[in-house]
Structure formats: C-alpha cells, structure tokens
Amino acid sequence: MSLGQTLRNRRDATPSPDPVAEGAGAPAPSRRGRPPVRKLSLRTRLRRDGALLLMVLPAVALLVVFAYVPMLGNVIAWQSYSPYTGFVDSPFVGWANFVRVFSNPLFLDAVQNTLVITAFQLVFFFPVPIVLALLLNSIVTPRVRTTIQSIVYLPHFFSWVLVVTVFQQIFGGAGLINQTLREAGLGSGFDLMTNPDTFLVLLTMQSVWKDAGWGIIIFLAALSTVPPEQYEAAAVDGANRWRRMWHVTLPALRPVIILLLILRLGDALTVGFEQLILQRGAVGADVAEVIDTYVYYQGVIYGDWSFAAAAGLVKGVVSLLLVLGANKLAHVFGESGVYRKS
C-alpha cells in the first residue's frame, strides 16, 4: 500500500466526534427544520458596523481616486487625443488606434519579448522560493533558519537602481569578475551587462536575488500549518525524507503554489518596468523592449497618447482573461484559486 493511501486510511478511520459526549445534546435539527434567519435592516447594520466602515473609508477613497477614476482616461484610446485640446474636444476615431496596435510590428515584438521573459522566469525563477523554503524548513535550529531567512529577504527592500548597480559592479565590463580575469591574464572580455544573448539569464538572476526571499516567507508560512503528526505517521510507516516531502509537504504547499501561479499568469504581461528600462539602453530594444516600456516610450516620450492607451488597454484585457482562465483551471483541479463562486 502506498504512503498516500495509508495516510488517507488513517484519516478516514478517525472516529467522528460524538455530539452527546461533547455536551452538545441532541443532534442539530435539519436545515429544513431551522427557523428562518431574520435579516437586519441596512440602518441596523450601519449602526452596528459604523466604526469599522469609518476606519476603512480613507482606504476606499484612495482606491477610488487613484485606481478607478483614472480608468476613465481610457476613453482616449478611441480618440485622436491631444493634451492641448483635452479628451472632451479631441475627435473620436473609433477602433483605428487598436488597428494600429495590432498591425504595428514593434508592438508585436514587444509582446513576444514579454512572453519569452515571462516563460523563462516562470521555469527558472518561480520554483526557486519553493526549493529554498523546503531547504530552510529542514533546518532544525530556529536561530540559523531565522538568520538565513533574514539575509535572503533583505534584498527585497532594495530599489532596482541599487540592484542593477550591484550587478554592474560585479558582472559589468569594469566589474569585479572582469578585473579578476584581467589580473590573472585570462582576458578581459567578460561583460554580462551588455550581452543581449545572456540578457534573459541576467534578468532572472536579478529577480531571484531581489525577490526570492519574499516568496520564501509565503511558503514557510504555509509549511508551518502542517501538523507534525502527519510527519510522524509517515515516518512510522517507513517513509524516508523524500517520501515525506512528496506525500506530506508538497500537498500542503499545493494551494499556495496554485494561487501564486494564477497571480503570476495574470501578471504575465508585466515583467518589471523599472528593471528593464534601466538596462534597455545597454542591451538594445530588440531584447529588452516589453509592453510597458513600449507604451511608456510611445505615450510619454513620443507623445502618441491614444496609441499608448490602446496598447495598455489591450494588455489589461488580456491580463484579466489570463486570471479568469487560470482561476477556472484551478477549480477544475479542485483548488479554490483566487476566488470561488458561492
């Protein structure tokens, strides 16, 4: 019998609690026999929750002013907008800007670069926090675990300017590695920061160094909810460390992994504006131009506001569809995902 089947048999064999023995008295009446629940009026609920609503009101106001009101500006995607005439007096052009978006080869190249970077980081960056969390969870000493976790989490607070600067000082043409090779007489042609062929590797290294610590905290929090009895039962059944990880640890992480994967897919068309725009000039737009940088240059630098708004709106719609599709796929596999219909 497999370890998974053994654990399920143990769980199924556990006797259900006796309501009489627990002092609950007779079994609860059926749903059909329950008295109807009287709904409170809106005035009563406002009086009861008035203090809570008052405390959350500033956050809601900030969200409305800075998130929802600016959405009204998307109307310029259907206009020939000029900041001198305003969106009220700018003429409507229908879907002409969207036709320009889908027929522009530079925009299609930016979409391709965005998807390539997302797919590469999904394979080589997304599993890194999971592996590190599993390794840290296997450390018995809490002090050592906390120290390592703090060191790994510290770069999360660094800005991308500082991260790129640190990598430049190490992997650049005048960096530490190139100087060491020059002193050893092994040449001086090493420059990872300006090499378009290795730009994907460079981006992933920077993302791992900066943000892997944040993912470790999330997965360690999920691992802390696993009852120790499950590990003890698996050890009694003869499971070694790897089988306990496969049958106990990974199933506990599965809901968190699926949730973060859904959010990552929804954010697939956003791959780090600051990180890329800081290094776009060093490696060239052929490999570093993504949707966000393309929209920035078209709208802010070149002043084609309507075209940039149409491109940004297309990105937002596609991102929404990715979140909905990934969440539906999570429901198919029996997970809650981001939300679940009641």
Image (cartoon, rainbow, N blue to C red):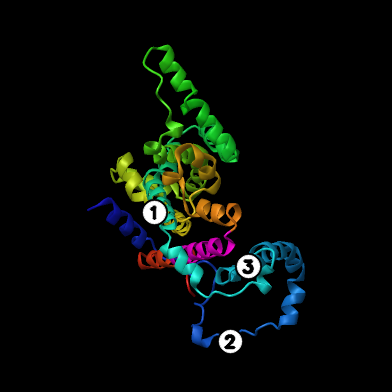
Tell me how far mark 1 sits from mark 2, CA to CA: 60 Å
Tell me how far mark 3 sits from mark 1, CA to CA: 27 Å
Contact (CB < 8 A) between labels 3 and 2? no
Give residue 112's mark. Answer: 1
Image spot of residue 154 (x, y percent): 57, 36
- Secondary structure type for disc 1: helix
Q: What's under tag 2, amino acid-wise?
A: Pro
3 or 2: tag closer to the N-terminus: 2
**Residue 314 on the magenta segment:** yes
Q: Could one spot residue 337 in this view of the protein?
A: no
* In-front residue for pair 276/157: 276
- Secondary structure type for disc 3: helix
3 or 1: tag closer to the N-terminus: 3
Identify whether 225 is placed above or below 153. below
Image spot of residue 216 (x, y percent): 49, 43
Q: What's under tag 1, amino acid-wise?
A: Gln
**Label 2 crowding class (10 Å Cα cut-off): few <14, some 14-19, many 20+?**
few
**Label 3 crowding class (10 Å Cα cut-off): few <14, some 14-19, many 20+?**
few
Identify whether 140 is placed above or below 340. above
Residue drawn where x is 56% and y is 63% of the image: 309
Tell me how far mark 3 sits from mark 2, CA to CA: 51 Å
Residue drawn where x is 33% and y is 39% of the image: 241
Residue drawn where x is 54% and y is 55% of the image: 298
Residue underneath mark 2: 35
Residue drawn where x is 38% and y is 12% of the image: 185
The region drawn magenta spans 304-321
Q: Quadrant of residue 44?
A: bottom right
Image spot of residue 205 (x, y percent): 44, 37
Return the residue found at the far top.
Answer: 184
Residue underneath mark 3: 73
Identify whether 144 is placed above or below 260. above
Q: Main structural element of the magenta stretch: helix, strand or loop?
A: helix
